Amino acid sequence: MVPSRCHSLRGTAVQRQLGVRVGEIRFTLFVAGDTPRSHLAIANLRRLANGRLAGRCSMRVVDVQKDPELAEAERILTTPTLIKESPMPARRVTGDLSDLELVLFALSLSTDE
Amino acid sequence: MPKKRANGRAGVDKIETGIPGFDFVAEGGLPAQRTTLVAGTAGSAKTVFAANFLAAGIARGEPGVFVTFEDSPDDLRRNMRGFDWDIAGWERDGKWAFVDVSQRADEEIAVVGEFDLGGLLSRIEHAVARIGARRVSIDSLNALFVRFPDRRLIRAELYRISSTLKRAGTTVVVTAERTEDYGAISLFGVEEFVADNVVILRNLLQDERRRRTLEVLKLRGAAHQRGEVPFTVMEREGIVVIPLTAQQLTQSSSTVRVTSGIQELDRMCHGGFFRDSIVLVSGATGTGKTLMVTQFLAGGFEAGERCLLFAFEESRDQLFRNAAAWGMDFEKAEKRGLLRVVNRYPHALPMEDHLVHMREILDEYRPNRVAVDSLSALERVFTLRSFREFVISLTSTLKRQTMTAMFTSTTPSLLGGGSVTEKHISTLTDSIVLLRYVELPGQIRRSISVLKMRGSPHDTDIRQYTIDSRGLHVGEPFSDVGGILGGHPMPVAGAGDSE
């Protein structure tokens, strides 16, 4: 559950001064345990975060087995489930996220946003 | 927590569900720590069953988790309030937990890549651990299959959930919908996943009436009753299953005698009725059956017994007036709490509801004697099959408490012969008293005879009786007439009056 910032190193100082940034994309990825599928989803999300969405997002990973209450609060049925919490509207995608283009499309995130 | 072993059968422990009548039909209850599928068409009360399973568990100190795929928790809390199930209260007390998987209109979820039901599994596991649940209800599987078209995946995941719940020591009820009452067990082949234990609920239209039935189709490794049995969904109760089997009927075993209310009849019975027997009084209209019931009740409350009358023929006021005319004070007895009269229109309720209401009153009032006047009034409005089931069930209920019961039945023809009622119930009663008109040249007389009395010798005479302002009086045997019971009385020439 360690949040990891995925902005590029160069902009760190500037970003620290600005604090919370408007338009930052916030992700929570729910996975079930330490399985290949969980790792795959995490890896895919990181690729997105370091690639197309570099510098624009933050993500956290929640293991439903370790935090079932949060899973209950967010009504997680399938895993992995990725929730884009902001910007609005909130969107969800379930699966190992193996098609990044499709993930972006499903989350209403296009390249020029 | 109570855990009853199935009677000596091949090793499957069962837990009593606590749903009235169900455990009897399932011969002990549901297989413990296993999953049972409850399948039925739309409107067959599957969700009620699933909730009832948990509610009955809570009454026995067993917390439960309800996983809902269709109705929202709010809807369920509201819908189940009619059964006096305070779900919200149980949630606060940590006895009931919802896992809400109902679909919200605003929730859309895209699928990219492979997934499983890990989220659901964790939530269920967590809820079970949090409240120490012993029971889990999952309602219903169809929603899952509709949402996720990959059946193989869903089945594999359901198997995983089922195994997890088994390891957690919980007994699980899973509901599924079917489209036909007599056909494939369920849609989507759900039964392949949980084929071991299946209960089918039906809601059939038969003879212009809705008829709910429950069938324990299979319980792997365990015995159970076969075939469909009726059940009803009752306000303030929930599901009440009405098991039918002669097994439940035990013969009168008491040797204590109580009065019939008519001294001469007591003599004919060599001391009166046995305290726990059921007496059928059969006769044509006007032969005095209601009078016999009146005297039966008076004999009871005058001896300090609590008496209950289910009156389907005459109103309470009529009964009280007539009783008073014969010198029996029903008003006073009622005020003293020794008499209770329940008036109902036979056609007001379906058979099952009549039965459950009667049982409730019997349980609550705990009478020493009960009369039903008349069974024929009910027979006229029930279907044949329902009527027989009703009598079996009522008789077995009466046998569970020690009380003397009297049923009246009207023969269709004035002179005699059997009625349909009698054909069905004469074997279920312990004693039969026949009242018959006797047509002789120029006059109508009346005869009374005790046809059978289990466990005791009795008068075999066919005696005359009269009715006057003080009630029914039994006189001398008919020594000059034969063929009375067959409905063809004929004077017997030259017979003396000593036998």
Image (spheres, grey):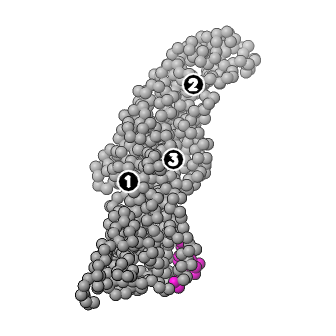
How many residues crowd around disc 3 within 10 Å: few (fewer than 14), some, or many (20 or more)? some
For label 3, the residue is B48
Sequence-wise, the earlier of marks 3 and 1 is 1
Give the magenta-colored segment's residue range: B326-341
Query: Quarter of the image holding residue B1?
Result: bottom left
Q: Is residue B444 left or right of residue B343?
A: left
**What numbered label is drawn on residue B25?**
1
Q: Nearer the viewer, mark 3 or mark 2?
A: 3
CB contact under 8 Å: marks 2 and 1: no
Disc 2 versus disc 1: nearer the observer: 1
Task: Give the image location of residue B431, x and y in percent.
Answer: 34, 74
Could you say which is closer to the camera, residue B187 or residue B51? B187
Q: Are marks 3 and 1 on the same chain?
A: yes
**In this rendering, does residue B166 appear at all?**
no
Q: In which quadrant of the rendered image does the C terminus of chain B lie?
A: bottom left
Residue displayed at 61% across by 28% down = B107
Residue type beneath disc 3: Val
State the residue in front, B35 or B304: B304
Parent chain of label 1: B
Instruction: Please give the name of the residue rendered at 32% of the width and 44% of the height, measured from the top-left corner.
Output: B220
B38 up-or-down from B321: above or below: above
Q: x, y (%) of residue B156?
A: 41, 30
The residue type indicated by label 1 comes to Val
Local crowd at mark 1 within 10 Å, few (<14), some, or many (≥20)?
Answer: many
Question: Which of the two residues, B81 or B434, is positioned nearer the viewer here?
Answer: B434
Residue furthest to the front in view is: B442
User: Dot 1 lies on which element?
Assistant: helix
**Does the magenta-highlighted stretch encompass residue B328?**
yes
Q: Label 2, secondary structure: give it.
A: strand
